[in-house]
């Protein structure tokens, strides 16, 4: 599978101020595969240390954490030479060995010429802040396959190129084809195992079975969140979030029988594990948006649109039969899709705008930062006359860029209204902030 993270990994490899790298992300998004592929293609050798499969390796980190001593011992155990500049030393499932996370600082200080990478999930649950090598590691984040990566994975590179190109140049025939592929992606999602399951037999049902298995594996992980979080409350919030995409989150609606503080802890834990993502309201009058992010007004999206489909319990046959992509699951899947694509294209920064005035409530689905300007982003199927909140936003913040409205329609530009209509499938390309 082609992953856009490959370009970031190459930049890290060639960087003059390189530090040990931690590739973060939720479980089963492809972290191990990506780093193994990177190591085998870009280095003379790959030294793999899997702390989950090979538990005795953890004992190497019980004593002193001198980098050269650890490397020397690993050469004996792995029966291979670890050569700076030629070997990628890869610590997999590093959260299973907190001392190895701490040891990364010594690799940075004592052996900066050695390429060291690690992959892990639930890192915040593995060790306290005092043990984390702050300032001595770099981070990258891996998400499920975005739509263009999915198209590459199923063997349709020309469609992937079209999705990444100029939406104004898409012909009506190609537009229809991309819409059909996008509807399948809505239901398959971007978890690599689900995509592979679909590819094996061209079966949506096989992908659905894998989604069920992934959701259950996440639930099994909930035991690792204790004692800080009630695991049963976690399960309730995990399921409920799929029914609240696009809505402002009220903790009381995420689970019955639990207090707001308990529900908040569960929601925050799911966000830490990257199973869910908080999307706070922000003030678009200036950058950075994170400086004005609200702690009280926020929405949420789930890790993956396919998992959202599974957790929501939606009738798949009825929803899949709908022709308008914006009508599937009352438009929530389209909003999840746009948010999921923008989370990657905006490099982890995802916000929206709302106005809570008593006489005039208004909301814009997302905010995109492109070339230093803030652009309002809407996910709509209606005509421009129905975009009341968007027009209010443009009038209130004239210094912001043109509005981007993602819909089921082909490209259409309305310069006099400062609005561009764009097909849903172009979300990543249009909102990419390089």
Image (cartoon, rainbow, N blue to C red):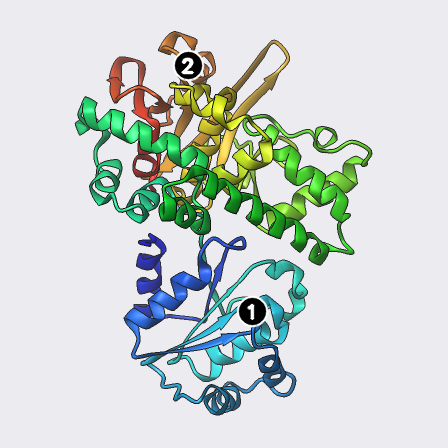
Q: Position of residue 61 (x, y in %)?
A: 60, 82
Look at 61% across and 79% down and name the residue there. Answer: 58
Q: Position of residue 217 (x, y in %)?
A: 61, 52
Q: Residues within 10 Å of mark 1 (few under 14, many from 20)?
A: many
Decide: marks 2, 1 in contact (CB < 8 A)? no
Tell me where residue 263 sits by quadrant. top right
Quadrant of the drawing holding the N terminus: bottom left
Give above or below for 389 relative to 288: above
Q: CA distance from mark 2 to mark 1?
A: 48 Å
Q: Is residue 434 visible?
A: no
Q: Position of residue 224 (x, y in %)?
A: 70, 58
- What element does badge 1 sit on? helix
Look at 39% across and 89% down and name the residue there. Answer: 81
- The residue that disc 1 covers is 94
For this view, does 143 lie left or right of residue 37? right
Tell me where residue 405 sits by quadrant. top left
Give above or below for 393 relative to 309: above
Q: Which mark is residue 391?
A: 2
- What element does badge 2 sit on? helix
Q: Is residue 176 visible?
A: yes
Along the line of sight, which residue is nearer the eye, 94 or 33?
Answer: 33
Q: Position of residue 391 (x, y in %)?
A: 41, 14
For this view, does 408 lie left or right of residue 191? left
Look at 54% across and 55% down and name the residue there. Answer: 27
Total numbered labels placed on residues in the image: 2
For this view, does 258 lie left or right of residue 165? right
Q: Residues within 10 Å of mark 2 (few under 14, many from 20)?
A: some
């Amino acid at each position: 599978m082609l992953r856009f993270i490959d370009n970031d990994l190459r930049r890290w490899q060639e960087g003059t101020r390189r530090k040990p790298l931690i590739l973060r992300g939720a479980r089963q998004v492809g972290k191990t595969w990506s780093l193994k592929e990177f190591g085998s293609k870009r280095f003379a050798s790959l030294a793999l240390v899997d702390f989950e499969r090979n538990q005795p390796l953890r004992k190497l980190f019980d004593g002193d954490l001198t980098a050269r001593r650890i490397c020397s011992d690993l050469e004996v155990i792995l029966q291979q030479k670890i050569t700076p500049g030629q070997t990628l030393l890869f610590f997999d499932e590093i959260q299973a060995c907190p001392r190895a996370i701490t040891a990364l600082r010594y690799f940075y200080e004592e052996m900066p010429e050695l390429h060291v990478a690690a992959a892990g999930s639930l890192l915040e649950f593995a060790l306290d802040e005092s043990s984390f090598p702050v300032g001595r590691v770099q981070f990258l984040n891996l998400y499920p396959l975005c739509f263009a990566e999915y198209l590459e994975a199923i063997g349709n590179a020309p469609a992937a190129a079209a999705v990444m190109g100029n939406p104004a140049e898409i012909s009506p025939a190609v537009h229809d084809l991309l819409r059909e592929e996008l509807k399948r992606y809505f239901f398959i999602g971007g978890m690599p195992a689900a995509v592979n399951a679909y590819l094996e037999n061209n079966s949506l049902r096989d992908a659905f079975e894998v989604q069920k298995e992934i959701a259950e594996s996440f639930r099994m992980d909930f035991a690792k969140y204790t004692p800080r979080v009630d695991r049963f409350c976690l399960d309730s919030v995990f399921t409920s979030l799929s029914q609240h995409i696009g809505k402002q989150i009220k903790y009381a609606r995420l689970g019955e029988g639990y207090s707001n503080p308990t529900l908040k802890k569960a929601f925050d834990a799911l966000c830490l594990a990257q199973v869910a993502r908080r999307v706070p309201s922000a003030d678009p009058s200036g950058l950075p948006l994170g400086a004005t992010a609200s702690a009280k007004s926020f929405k949420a999206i789930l890790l993956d649109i396919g998992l959202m489909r599974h957790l929501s319990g939606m009738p798949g046959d009825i929803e899949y039969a709908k022709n308008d992509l914006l009508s599937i699951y009352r438009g929530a899947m389209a909003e999840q899709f746009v948010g999921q694509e923008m989370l990657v294209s905006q490099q982890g920064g995802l916000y929206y705008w709302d106005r809570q005035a008593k006489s005039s409530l208004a909301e814009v689905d997302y905010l995109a930062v492109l070339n230093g300007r803030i652009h309002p982003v809407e996910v709509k199927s209606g005509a421009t006359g129905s975009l009341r909140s968007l027009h209010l936003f443009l009038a209130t913040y004239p210094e912001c860029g043109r509005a981007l409205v993602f819909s089921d329609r082909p490209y259409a530009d309305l310069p006099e209204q400062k609005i561009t209509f764009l097909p849903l499938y172009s979300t990543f390309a249009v909102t990419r902030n390089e």
